[in-house]
Structures are given as C-alpha cells and as structure tokens.
C-alpha cells in the first residue's frame, strides 16, 4: 500500500520544524504530499528525496528543519493543489510566524471552507484576508507575539485540531483543543515522537488535547505505514468480487482510522487482521479478505470521524450488498474534495442502484447483486470518487467510466496498475471509444 497520506504530510511539516535531520521511509509520493514538500522548501526547510535510499531500494526522504518559529517568509504564492490537509495545517504554522504568506489551490480546494481554521487561528493574533465565504486564495499575516489559545472545535475535524496545535507550537504556554468526538490523532502522536509535551484527557467520546508551546522539536525517524484509506479500495474490490482472496500488507490500523473495517465486519465481511505490530508509534497489520457477500447495516453517526474518507467506497460496498445500508450523519462529506454525498448518490443512481439522501444521511438499497453499471461518472477533481466508481466497475455487468482519472494521483499513484494486477481492467478510454 502507498504510505499514509495524513502521516506523510505531518512527517514533512514536523521535520521542517525540528532541529536536525529527519529521515522518512515509506512517504506517500502523491501530489498532495508533494505539495506539502514544496511548501516546506518555500518556507526554508531542506527537503530531499533519495531514489533508492530506503529499505528494499525504496525512496527515502530527508528533511533538515529550522526549529520551532524558524520558518522564513515564502517569496511566492504557496500552491497547495488539491490538498486540504496541506492548506489547513500549514495555515496553523503560518499563523504564529511574523510574516505574510499567500496561499492558493486547485479548483476543488478553492471551493472549500477555510473559516473553520482562520477563526481559531485569529485568536492567536494572526490576520487573514480571503475570498467570499472564507475561500482560497487567502493571505495570512502571522503574529510574532502569539498568545496560547483554548479552543473547542465545533466540527469533528483533525485538520482543525491540528491547525490549532501547530499554531500553538510557537505560542508560549499551553494551547488546548477540545473535541466532542475523537478524530485521527497522528498530530498528537508525532509531536510527542519529536519531543513535544502533549497530554490527552478523555471524557466519554470527548478529548481534551493540551500542547506545551515553544518546545524544542528534535529530528526523529519516521516510518510511514500503509494508508488504511487507500487499502479500502482493493479490500472492497475483493469483497464485492465473488471468490476473491486478497492479502493487503502493511496497513495502518490506528483505531481512529479504522471505522470502515469495523463496519465491513458488521456487514459480514470475511476480514482478518494478521501480523499485528507497532511501527514508528502507529499500529500496523496485514489484512486478509475473502469475497463472500455483504449485508446492509445502519452505520452510526458517531463512527463518521473514524472513517470520514471511506464513505464513497462504503457506498459502493453497500450497493453490492443485500438489504439496506443507512450511513448516518454525513454533513462533513459535503465539504471534502467534492460534495461526496451528492456525488455518490448521483453516480450510484446513474449506475442503476437505488439510493437516496435524507438530511445528512445516505441510504443505499442493496439487492445482493451489483447494480448494472454502464454510466460515466463525473469526478469533480475528487480522487476518492474516481477510485470508488472504478472499483464498482469490477462487479457491475456493464463497465463504469469516470470522466477524469488524473485526481487519483493525489493520494494513490499507481492505482490502476495495482488494481489491474488484481484482475481489474482499468484503462483510458480512447476518443473513439468514449461514450
Ligand atoms: C485529515 C483529516 C480529515 C480527512 C483528510 C485528512 C488529516 O479531514 O478527511 O483526508 O490528515 O488530518 P477533516 O479534518 O476535514 O475531517
């Protein structure tokens, strides 16, 4: 599996803030992470790639950091491409450096809401200018006299939590983020790995994360585990393709990322974790899966944070299952790389599935066999929409096309090659063959 996207971003950012050389193995070399690498270079860190410097001849990345508070003003606009994580986490860093930066992104990122981070970051003393509705391009004037902040996040978002914690790195005293529902904790884990003091208190589902500001971050090696959000595509492909048997090696199993796999098990998936271990502070396992049929279930809203990126592929699994799957509480899906709630409902309906949206819930009526397929689905610059519908095409009678596969490279370079190696037939449509 390609390296975990969330962990890869953080390895480069924290390496850029640490003193010394951070060595990163298994980094995801997708466009989103490369946007973060370019931004960290523009902010004065040295970031290098060695073609075959890592284990088994794989690439190794090295980052020489500037120390907390040591980033320099970028001479040009920072282009975050398609990557919400790069944009929002970086805004946290920029907010507490005394300099002015301008940030933009592609057509998808320029539609996404940024006030969810600029509002808490203003509390540190930073100023922001942005387009209507808090959209990119955006300018930030960071403060050199930050005050620490206590913030309760109104949305369940690891990006918001992380942006506040990263701003807090260069503020004296304690910065606290309270989240009503636990979101992925890679920031907390990796900051601790780099020597920061981070405490976490839990109160039922809620978590209070406290960071002591202005630590000396010390370079530390990072081994990036395989991305459970990427593994979801071959795993669901195996589950909806009768008689499949697949082992996916080296998948991160952090419980705050693992909701999809719990859900698939509840749907009756034959899914076994093998060789469970801890690597670089993150739990990892090999996943063994067999295609034996799935049954629809009710997916509780409380689980959404632990599988937020996996609903598109879960909706595909649901369309091939028997019975009704109800996915509750998906408001956040509307503000991802595309409006994923609408994209999945419309794309599945075009492929012949019975599906509806009720409020923020997505309901898919499975018949026990895959829908007929035969549609071309608009991707709207969203990698996970593209990959989900290509996986659906493995089970449908008629092929499924997507109108643009380029976005897949943001998170899963080599996706079509890997899936074709598993028996899929994914190929570009020639102009004459296009519907
Ligand atoms: C991410 C957090 C999630 C997720 C995104 C990666 C992160 O976003 O959708 O792909 O690395 O922190 P939200 O925080 O907006 O839920």
Image: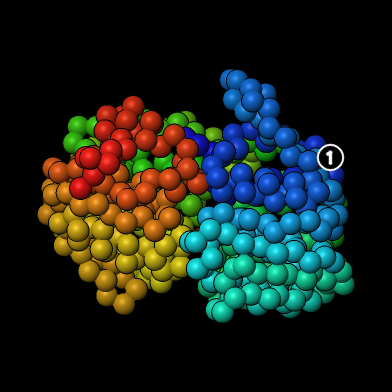
- Judge from the rendering whether residue 106 lies leftward or rightward of residue 101; answer left or right: left
Q: Is residue 159 visible?
A: yes
Residue displayed at 18% across by 36% down: 242
Image quadrant of residue 133? bottom right
- Judge from the rendering whether residue 316 lies leftward or rightward of residue 396; answer left or right: right
Q: Residues within 10 Å of mark 1 (few under 14, many from 20)?
A: some
Residue displayed at 65% across by 60% down: 89
Q: Position of residue 317 (x, y in %)?
A: 26, 50
Q: Position of residue 107 (x, y in %)?
A: 49, 61
Residue displayed at 79% across by 76% down: 125
Image quadrant of residue 391? top left
Q: Position of residue 395 (x, y in %)?
A: 20, 42
Q: How many numbered marks, from 0 up?
A: 1
Q: Nearer the viewer, residue 278 or 78?
A: 78
* Whether the residue under disc 1 has CB within 8 Å of ligand 1: no
User: Helix, strand or loop at disc 1?
Assistant: loop
**Residue at label 1?**
20
Colour approach in the figure:
rainbow
């Amino acid at each position: 599996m390609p390296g975990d996207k969330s962990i890869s971003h953080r390895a480069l950012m924290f390496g850029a803030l640490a003193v010394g050389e951070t060595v990163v193995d298994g980094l995801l070399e997708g466009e989103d992470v490369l946007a973060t690498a370019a931004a960290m270079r523009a902010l004065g860190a040295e970031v290098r790639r060695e073609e075959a410097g890592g284990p088994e001849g794989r690439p190794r990345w090295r980052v020489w950091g500037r120390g907390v508070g040591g980033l320099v003003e970028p001479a040009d606009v920072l282009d975050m491409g398609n990557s919400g994580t790069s944009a929002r986490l970086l805004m946290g860093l920029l907010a507490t450096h005394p300099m002015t930066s301008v940030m933009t992104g592609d057509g998808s990122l320029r539609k996404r809401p940024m006030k969810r981070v600029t509002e808490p970051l203003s509390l540190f003393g930073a100023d922001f200018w942005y387009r209507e509705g808090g959209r990119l391009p955006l300018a930030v004037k960071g403060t050199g006299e930050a005050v620490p902040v206590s913030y309760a996040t109104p949305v369940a978002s690891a990006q918001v939590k992380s942006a506040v914690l990263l701003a807090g790195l260069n503020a004296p005293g304690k910065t606290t983020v309270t989240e009503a529902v636990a979101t992925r904790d890679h920031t907390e884990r990796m900051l601790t790995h780099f020597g920061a003091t981070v405490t976490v208190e839990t109160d039922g589902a809620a978590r209070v994360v406290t960071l002591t500001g202005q630590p000396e971050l010390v370079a530390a090696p990072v081994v990036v585990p395989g991305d459970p959000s990427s593994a979801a595509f071959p795993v669901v492909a195996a589950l909806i393709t009768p008689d499949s048997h697949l082992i996916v090696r080296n998948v991160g199993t952090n419980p705050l990322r693992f909701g999809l796999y719990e859900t698939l098990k509840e749907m009756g998936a034959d899914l076994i974790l093998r060789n469970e271990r801890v690597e670089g502070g993150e739990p990892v396992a090999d996943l063994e899966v067999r295609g034996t049929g799935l049954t629809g279930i009710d997916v509780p809203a409380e689980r959404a944070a632990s599988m937020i990126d996996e609903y598109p592929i879960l909706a595909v699994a649901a369309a091939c299952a028997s019975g009704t799957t109800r996915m509750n509480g998906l408001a956040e899906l509307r503000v991802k790389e595309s409006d994923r709630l609408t994209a999945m409902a419309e794309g599945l309906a075009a492929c012949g599935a019975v599906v509806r949206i009720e409020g923020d819930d997505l309901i898919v009526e499975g018949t026990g066999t895959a829908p007929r397929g035969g549609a071309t689905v608009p991707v709207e610059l969203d990698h996970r929409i593209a990959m989900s519908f290509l996986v659906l095409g493995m089970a449908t009678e008629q092929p499924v096309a997507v109108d643009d596969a380029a976005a897949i490279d943001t998170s899963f370079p080599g996706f079509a090659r890997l899936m074709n190696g598993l028996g899929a037939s994914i190929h570009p449509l020639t102009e004459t063959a296009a519907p």
